[in-house]
Image (tube, grey):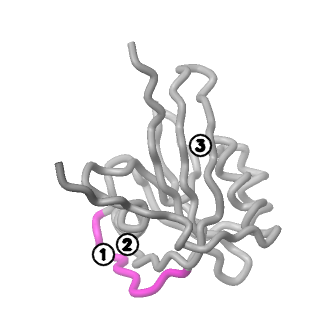
Amino acid sequence: MTWKPHATVAAVVERDGKFLMVEEEVNGEIVYNQPAGHLDPDEDLIDAVIRETQEETGWKFTPEALLGVYLWQQPNTGRTFLRFAFSGTCSEHQPEQQLDEGILQALWMSKDELQASNKLRSPMVMQNIEDYLSGQRYPLELLSTVDYER
């Protein structure tokens, strides 16, 4: 069997000291996560994070920087995730939009509220917020999608 990490993207958006989060049901548990999801075939990382944020929150996301690349293995299943986290801004909210399956709601939460909830989907959630608050940012130009012909 070939080991393949799951390539995912996540959006970190702060407004007035609160972060855009999704409340979602995963395996019967209610947890909080950044708007995040898997990279689709024939999609680049920037398009993926814009799409996932729209689908999960109804907000249009504009990535401004790469926050970091995170590798995490889920201890119960052994599944490995390679997360590309982006910071940016949101505009053009469509509150009437139906959200992705499993997403209960999009909401704005402070770091303290998230920590007190003890219901984070993974440790990457708080790590992304900590890195964002520390000022960690990398230019989007760091990422490249290489097109080639066979």
The residue that mark 2 highlights is: 58
**Total labels drawn:** 3
Indicate which disc, 2 or 1, sits on the residue closer to the N terminus: 2
Residue farthest along the left direction in this orientation: 150
In the picture, measured across the screen, residue 29 lies left or right of residue 72, that is left
**Which label was assigned to residue 112?**
none
**Which label was assigned to residue 96?**
1
145 vs 17, nearest the viewer? 145
Compared to 70, does 132 lie above or below? Answer: below
Label 1 residue SS? loop
Residue 147: x, y in percent?
Answer: 28, 60
Residue 8: in magenta span: no
Compared to 106, does 16 lie above or below? Answer: below
Stretch in magenta: 89-98
The residue that mark 3 highlights is: 121
Mark 2 in CB contact with mark 1 (< 8 angstroms)? yes
> Is disc 2 surrounded by few (<14), some (14 to 19) or many (20+) residues within 10 Å?
many
In the picture, measured across the screen, residue 101 lies left or right of residue 127, that is left
Mark 1 in CB contact with mark 3 (< 8 angstroms)? no
> Is disc 3 surrounded by few (<14), some (14 to 19) or many (20+) residues within 10 Å?
some
In the picture, measured across the screen, residue 43 lies left or right of residue 49, that is left
Label 2 residue SS? loop
Residue 98: x, y in percent?
Answer: 28, 64
- The residue drawn where x is 66% and y is 47% is 124
Residue farthest along the bottom direction in this orientation: 92
Q: Please, what is the three-letter code of the amino acid marked with disc 3?
A: Arg
Q: Please, what is the three-letter code of the amino acid marked with disc 1?
A: Glu
Residue 60: x, y in percent?
Answer: 40, 78
Between the residue at mark 2 and the residue at mark 1, the CA separation in whole angstroms equals: 8 Å
- The residue drawn where x is 80% and y is 61% is 112
